[in-house]
Image (cartoon, rainbow, N blue to C red):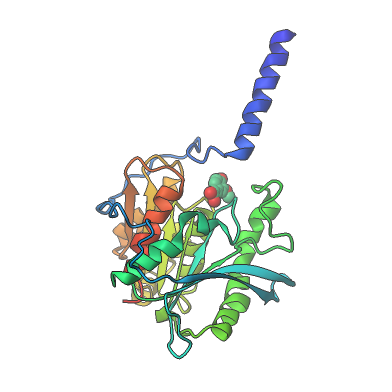
Amino acid sequence: MKKLYLASLMALAALCANAQEPQIGRMPGMPKIECNFNEYKPAPEDFDKENASAEKGSIEEVEYESKTVGTKRKATIYLPPNYDSSKKYPVMYLLHGIGGDHKEWMIGTPNIIMDNLIAQKKAVPMIIVMPNGRALADDSAQGNIYSAEKVKGFEIFERDLIDDLIPFIQNKYSTYTDKAHRAIAGLSMGGGQSLNFGLGNLDTFDYVGGFSSAPNTKQPDQLIPDVNTTKKENKLLWMVCGGEDGLMFNSARLKKFCDEKNVPCTLIEYPGGHHDFVVWKYGLYNYAQLIFK
Ligand code: FER
């Protein structure tokens, strides 16, 4: 009896630990998918360190009316150094993971990474929009974030993004409005969303990035139903995933398909990388240098 009690207690403790920090690295039953990775080049030591001599962009929070959800929804905005409304800027939509919201990307100090890249002219000045990708009336990361209802919000966000958020951003800021000046990328659930929405709306996004993309990523033949159209319309399909991340199969499956069909696609395996901001910051650092050029 005592043993049983102890066993249940341990099971409960394991469950609780799991609830706080899901073991993303382990997805039993998922086969390892062999594919050709692209070369990993480390980022410079100081890519995410504040540099006093680099001009600074700014961060602000906005609220927009979502017809899709029927509520006001929040987004975090990065404006590049010396944002000037008499100029026009390209826009990157940068999406968070299953446990995050519009503030999650700030953990990765995207403002510092971008300020440095722009100062070094490695990236063009751009606006970065970090929305809440859980398009529900209660879009908080509270409660069971893995519940079907909460996860559904990440799917519904496709309409919120295209019908509500993008028009709002283009109205509020001085942006280009063509697909050549619009990019989408995200981490984990946001990576899956980026691949789904980016490749699914080739008339809206030229550049698509998935960092450690989650199992919400559609199957390759759904993402790329017509190889020739994707090859013609997409300008960049770029992915990274940690070598120790159990979600690698989502990225590897797409990379394998693209290689077989001759669709240009990059997938970097971050050596020893886990499901965390080490990989995601590296993703932003690299992806930001490849877009709008
Ligand atoms: C899953 C494992 C991980 C899943 C989503 C995730 C929807 C997302 C992880 C993240 O965003 O960090 O099975 O199913």
**Looking at this view, is 55 or 24 the one in front?**
55
**Looking at this view, is 127 or 84 the one in front?**
84
The answer to whether 56 appears left or right of 133 in the picture is left
**Residue at horizontal 50 percent and vertical 54 percent from the top:** 107
> Farthest residue in the bottom direction?
86
> Is residue 253 visible in the rendered structure shown here?
no
Question: Quadrant of the image for the C terminus?
Answer: bottom left
- Return the x and y of residue 89 as percentages of the image width and height: 43, 82
> Farthest residue in the front direction?
52
- Return the x and y of residue 249 as percentages of the image width and height: 42, 46
**Looking at this view, is 195 or 285 the one in front?**
285
Q: Quadrant of residue 231?
A: bottom left
The answer to whether 101 appears left or right of 45 in the picture is right
Q: Quadrant of residue 50?
A: bottom left
- Return the x and y of residue 129 as percentages of the image width and height: 52, 70
Question: Quadrant of the image for the N terminus?
Answer: top right
- Return the x and y of residue 285 as percentages of the image width and height: 36, 60
Q: Is residue 107 above or below residue 170?
A: above
Q: Is residue 213 above or below residue 232?
A: above
Q: Is residue 181 above or below residue 285?
A: below
Q: Quadrant of residue 65?
A: bottom right
User: How many numbered discs sit on the rendered protein?
Assistant: 0
> Is residue 135 visible in the rendered structure shown here?
yes
**Residue at horizontal 60 percent and vertical 75 percent from the top:** 165
**Residue at horizontal 46 percent and vertical 58 percent from the top:** 109
